[in-house]
Image: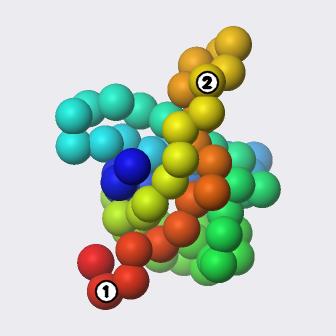
């Protein structure tokens, strides 16, 4: 799937990704692949963040994003 980092909580280590369809997915910093948490928080810096590829995982607390990777040159 493709989405955009919509909100991020740097001190807590998690954020949310929103798809074009309006679906929102929770992600934890441990789900990142190929980018460090600190680098992602800098890219977001109080605004919407970069586009990302991710896989959806069902969870009892709602949909989660795993294997979150930045889309190059997006």
Q: Residue at x 39, y 49 (%)?
A: 1
The front one of 15 and 54 is: 54
Residue 73 position within the rendered picture, expressed as x and y whole percent measured from the top left: 31, 86
Query: Residue 52, how many percent across, how many down?
Result: 42, 63
Q: Considering only order in the chain, which callout, 2 or 1, is on the residue closer to the N terminus?
A: 2
- Left or right of residue 20, residue 60 in this image: right
Outermost residue to the top: 60
Residue appearing at x 63%, y 57% in the figure? 67
The residue carrying pointer 1 sits among few (fewer than 14), some (14 to 19) or many (20 or more) residues within 10 Å by Cα, namely few
User: 15 or 67: nearer the eye?
Assistant: 67
Does residue 63 appear to the left or right of 35 in the view shown?
left
Whether residue 54 is situated above or below residue 60 in the rendered picture: below
Which residue is label 2 attached to?
58
Q: Nearer the viewer, mark 1 or mark 2?
A: 2
Front residue (pair 39, 57)? 57
**Label 2 environment density (alpha carbons within 10 Å; few <14, some 14–19, many ≥20):** few
Question: Is residue 5 at all visible to an observer of this figure?
Answer: yes
> Circle 1 sits on which residue?
73
55 up-or-down from 25: above or below? below
Q: Number of callouts in the render?
A: 2
Q: Position of residue 12 (x, y in %)?
A: 75, 47
């Amino acid at each position: 799937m493709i989405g955009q980092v919509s909100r991020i909580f740097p001190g807590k280590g998690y954020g949310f990704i929103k798809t074009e369809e309006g679906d929102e997915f929770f992600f934890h910093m441990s789900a990142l692949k190929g980018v460090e948490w600190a680098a992602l928080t800098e890219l977001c810096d109080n605004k919407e963040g970069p586009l990302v590829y991710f896989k959806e995982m069902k969870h009892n607390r709602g949909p989660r994003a795993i294997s979150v990777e930045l889309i190059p040159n997006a």
